[in-house]
Image (spheres, coloured by chain):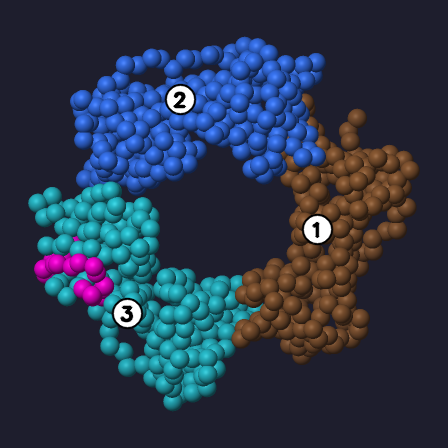
Chain colours: A blue, B brown, C cyan
Amino acid sequence: MLHAEVKSDILRDLVDIVGTIVDEVKFNLSEDGINLRAVDPAHVAMVDVTLSKSAFEKYEADETELGINLNKIEQFLKLSSAGEIVKLDHVEDENRLVLEVDNITQKMPLLDTAGMTDPTVPQLDLPISLTVEGRHLLKGVKASQNISDHIALTAGPDGFEIFSEEDEDMVRLNLPKDMLNEINANEEAKSLFALDYFSSMIKSVSSDTPIKIDLGSDYPVVLEFKFADGNGDVKFLLAPRIESA
Amino acid sequence: MLHAEVKSDILRDLVDIVGTIVDEVKFNLSEDGINLRAVDPAHVAMVDVTLSKSAFEKYEADETELGINLNKIEQFLKLSSAGEIVKLDHVEDENRLVLEVDNITQKMPLLDTAGMTDPTVPQLDLPISLTVEGRHLLKGVKASQNISDHIALTAGPDGFEIFSEEDEDMVRLNLPKDMLNEINANEEAKSLFALDYFSSMIKSVSSDTPIKIDLGSDYPVVLEFKFADGNGDVKFLLAPRIESA
Amino acid sequence: MLHAEVKSDILRDLVDIVGTIVDEVKFNLSEDGINLRAVDPAHVAMVDVTLSKSAFEKYEADETELGINLNKIEQFLKLSSAGEIVKLDHVEDENRLVLEVDNITQKMPLLDTAGMTDPTVPQLDLPISLTVEGRHLLKGVKASQNISDHIALTAGPDGFEIFSEEDEDMVRLNLPKDMLNEINANEEAKSLFALDYFSSMIKSVSSDTPIKIDLGSDYPVVLEFKFADGNGDVKFLLAPRIESA
């Protein structure tokens, strides 16, 4: 069962975030809100998003799984403007999700959730944790795109660096300690990542969103940030790309 | 003979409207204004546009037919801004149309009008007639594009609906009586149309333009609206697409 | 040796101007500023640009040649906004150019300048010289693009015309004497040019930039204008396209 009303832009953010990893996903509904978890087809990146009941104008649901094609929701949301309220209803006997905004009603069939797994972001004990504003990550990614298809994240007691090189070309965005919101680092760490994945993961953040980054050496990176006025929690995990010797 | 001056944006609207149906068309000039009529190459849609003498800053013409390539006029109009006055002259001994705006002069050869017919929108006695603002049709078309390549228009005593479905996906824009400017309907009617044609026909209307729609069941639809501050009259006819059983 | 600081938009203008002719170019450094000269691969157009020391916030250089890929500079500049200061340093022992803006550092290898020539715009004694604002050239080029792939420039005691024709289509932008900043012409002259080259050469000028044009009959045209608040000098030469009889 699902009867919910939510601002169009909150639903759009949810779809944008999870849509960077998969097109089809299982919405895990409970009384307290919605949770989505997914691994990309190449098993390189993982996302875990929770949108709490408090993000909604109205929310009523019981323990249910709905298989949803995110592209269809994305298309539907283009019919609405930012402040408008979207209604979501699960019509059980039709096995369809019904979306309404203004005087438009859209119905879409639900997907079979049998093959959809429930991955859990593993608990990693990473040596470095820091928080940085979105605009820095966005700029570092933009700079790296000129140089290479991978990106290196390095951090240590003095600060954080985004780095990319290819042959003799190199670019570096240097963020000393005082340009970060926070950093806890007693050692140096460096990991290399596929730039297209990293870039997708942060493309929905706004320039002033604080992003928590947990980093190790040749370990996955964990990115965490909030959306929906703090009522939504996002956790991304991205596997490292091991440098060839 | 033609010596005329008209605001750039009025000429642009004329070209946009007729350009949805054909690229080459006959301008039928008379003392009272210009009339253009055309059927698309697939004989699915028809347009009949009249731009009265009163739409022009200056207008002098006698009974003449000018064969014109609308793309060339469209390109020329990109050299002007909305308020600017465009001069049109028929240079008979060169068999060319001369356009002027600001300090630019463009000459284009006239087309042979021998093969250009003068279709007349047939008088159809359709059971339902309603008037709706452009923004509703534009939104209904946008919604339908997510779902299918055809669009259903249904109307009855209670109101008007734009509807599209494909497999188990469905979208509906519902316009109850009070969201319409006017409706005269004593029965229900429904017809199906090719979405790309319908979409083209309304793409030049602005969101607050009232559009009159005459509708039957599995009959052509007739759309009528005004442009050029009420000095231009447009009539479109679109053949229905018969639903396969 | 090079240690320089310059506003991002000045460097961008320099790169845009020379980038219309070549992708790789030799920066000829001296105590007084930077000079770049290049001929396009088809030997149809030539550029000679000087950016004086006074265009820079800081400038220190000795007689040096740096081989530079302009695309890499262009990409780098997209990371900066108009007012920001870009630092340029030649790191001699690495044979690399280092660019810095805000907290971003980019290094790029220098190119071998052995094969890069130093063309000189020839001194031509052209009969007509006139000065016109950028917006007129930009509009004339836009009008001509609708008609043909070449453009004719004609001038005489009465004024200047940009002209294009193909079969029976023709467009003309007429600039009588009083719409020009200046004209010195005792005779008529007309030359024809490839539109894509001419269009590229003026695409970086702003609408109020005065452009000096030296013109003859079936002779190359010379365009001269300033950038960087008058601290940069641009000279373009474009070979004529001879009309087939």
Q: Residue at x 71, y 32 (%)?
A: B172
> Callout 3: residue from which chain?
C
Query: Can you tell which quarter of the image residue A171 is in?
Result: top left
Q: Which quadrant of the rendered structure holds the C terminus of chain B?
A: top right
Q: Secondary structure at mark 2?
A: strand
Neighbor class of circle 2 (other Cα within 10 Å; few <14, some 14-19, many 20+) is many
Is residue A218 rendered magenta in the image?
no
Task: Give left or right: position of A125 versus C140.
Answer: left
Q: Secondary structure at mark 3?
A: loop
Residue B202, horizontal then vertical, whole percent? 70, 48
Task: Give left or right: position of B192 versus B71.
Answer: right
Is residue C53 rendered magenta in the image?
yes
For disc 1, the marked residue is: B208
Query: Can you tell which quarter of the image residue B18 is in?
Result: bottom right
The reply to whether the C-beta atoms of the residues labelled 2 and 3 are less than 8 Å apart is no
* Mark in the foreground, 3 or 1: 1
The answer for how far apart the CA atoms under marks 2 and 1 are is: 45 Å
Give the residue type that dot 2 points to: Lys
Neighbor class of circle 1 (other Cα within 10 Å; few <14, some 14-19, many 20+) is few
Give the residue type that dot 3 points to: Gly
Q: Residue at x 26, y 56 (%)?
A: C7
